[in-house]
Amino acid sequence: LTRNKEYQKAEEVLQREAVKAPSNPEILYQQGSLQYLQNNPAHVESFAKLFALYSDKQSQDIPVKYHRSFQIIARAYYQQKRYDSVTTVFRKIPDSMLDTGDRTSYAKSLFFTRNYPEAQSRLEKLNLSADDRLLLIKCYRQTGNETKAYSMLKPIVLGTQNSSLETD
């Protein structure tokens, strides 16, 4: 039905099936997908219910097609500044499925939830903007790596990447 853009009929069928089996992951997935196709914000709730069914599973035990729906809700949570939820969801998605924006959002969410070691590890793997480099510097400081923080901060303060301060 969705291939023929018969969204109304598809929605009616899914609603009837959801009454019979409200925790059926395939129904939740199809409902969320249909809502997403129609730009209906209810897709976040449908995908969140789907995620709840798999929250105690390992990534490899989750059907691959569901990972995309998890990506969608992680992005929505990031927009809502629900950083704990962002990190919880992204942990269930294989890194290979994350694009640069997702990796950056994940790293920042780890930072905002004060998981500095993991945020640092993820930020180090990214091509960072100036603001994001400052987050990495803060991670280094929070994890006790003052030398690394200083070496990154020095070129920013001096306004050049290849600067050398005279040593004492």
Image: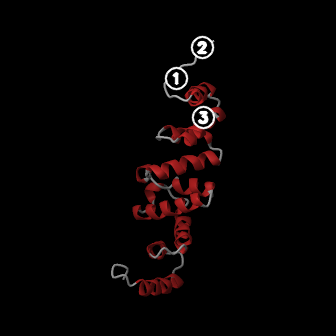
| Cα distance in 3D space between marks 3 and 2 | 21 Å
Q: What residue type is disc 2 on?
A: Thr
In the current view of this chain or complex, which residue is farthest to the top?
168
Q: Nearer the viewer, residue 132 or 29?
A: 132
Q: What residue type is disc 3 on?
A: Ile
Relative height, residue 26 to residue 98 (above, below) = below
- Picture coordinates of residue 85 (x, y %)? 60, 58
Viewport quadrant of the N terminus: bottom left
Callout 2: SS: loop
| Cα distance in 3D space between marks 2 and 1 | 12 Å
Q: Nearer the viewer, residue 3 or 15?
A: 3
Q: Residue 167: give its label.
A: 2
Which is more foreground, mark 2 or mark 1? Answer: 1
Label 1 belongs to which residue? 163
- Picture coordinates of residue 167 (x, y %)? 60, 14
**Circles 1 and 3 in contact, beta carbons < 8 Å:** no
Callout 3: SS: helix
Q: What residue type is disc 1 on?
A: Ser
| Cα distance in 3D space between marks 1 and 3 | 17 Å
Q: Residue 137: give its label.
A: 3
**Circles 3 and 2 in contact, beta carbons < 8 Å:** no
In the current view of this chain or complex, which residue is farthest to the left?
4
In the current view of this chain or complex, which residue is farthest to the front?
159
**Residue drawn at point x = 55 percent, y = 46 percent:** 107
**Residue drawn at point x = 47 percent, y = 39 percent:** 125
